[in-house]
Image: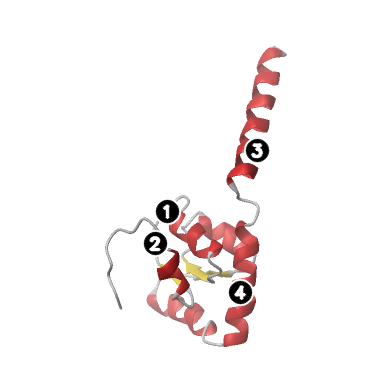
Amino acid sequence: MVFAGPQTDVRRYLGAADAFVLPTLYDPLSNAVLEALACGLPVVTSRRCGAGELVVAHDAAGPATRSTMPAFAERMRALLDPAERARRAERAVAAVAALTPEAMTGRLLDLYGRLLGAAGAR
């Protein structure tokens, strides 16, 4: 295990991993989870992690059913199977494929347009 401190580019570290585990008690939308998914890592996190919804929706591993060590260990054990890990890794990349800066900018501009249109209709 290596504790490398803060990093500006995590790709080489995530690239060396087989999976990503974030046993958070609460996190509205973890950038770390999004980065792990973009690097093709299956993600195991808690149900209290907002990014966990994205993981579940795309079946990219999933949340532990309970925030306990045995629940996390159970999810992690499933990823010991290379075929299962590869299947989840493929889905991980798909989970964030639509979250490019261009796509997110377009969605934000669309939202602003709808909000301004609704405000002008009053």
Gap in angstroms between the C-alphas marked 3 and 1: 23 Å
Coloured how?
A: secondary structure
Considering depth in this image, is 109 or 64 the residue closer to the camera?
Answer: 109
Gap in angstroms between the C-alphas marked 1 and 4: 22 Å
Query: Nearer the N terminus, badge 1 or badge 4?
Result: 1
From the viewer's perspective, tell me whether residue 33 is left or right of residue 83: left
Query: Nearer the N terminus, badge 3 or badge 1?
Result: 1
Q: Quadrant of the C terminus?
A: top right
Q: Which residue is denoted by mark 4 in the rendering? A: 88
Q: Which residue is denoted by mark 2 in the rendering? A: 24
Q: Secondary structure at mark 2?
A: loop
Q: Quadrant of residue 30?
A: bottom left
Gap in angstroms between the C-alphas marked 4 and 3: 27 Å
Q: Residue at x 59, y 58 (%)?
A: 54
Q: Which dot, 3 or 1, sits closer to the camera?
A: 3
Q: Which residue is denoted by mark 3 in the rendering? A: 107
Q: Secondary structure at mark 1?
A: loop
Q: Amino acid at mark 2?
A: Thr
Label 1 Cα neighbours within 10 Å, binned few <14 / some 14-19 / many ≥20: some
Q: Which residue is denoted by mark 1 in the rendering? A: 27
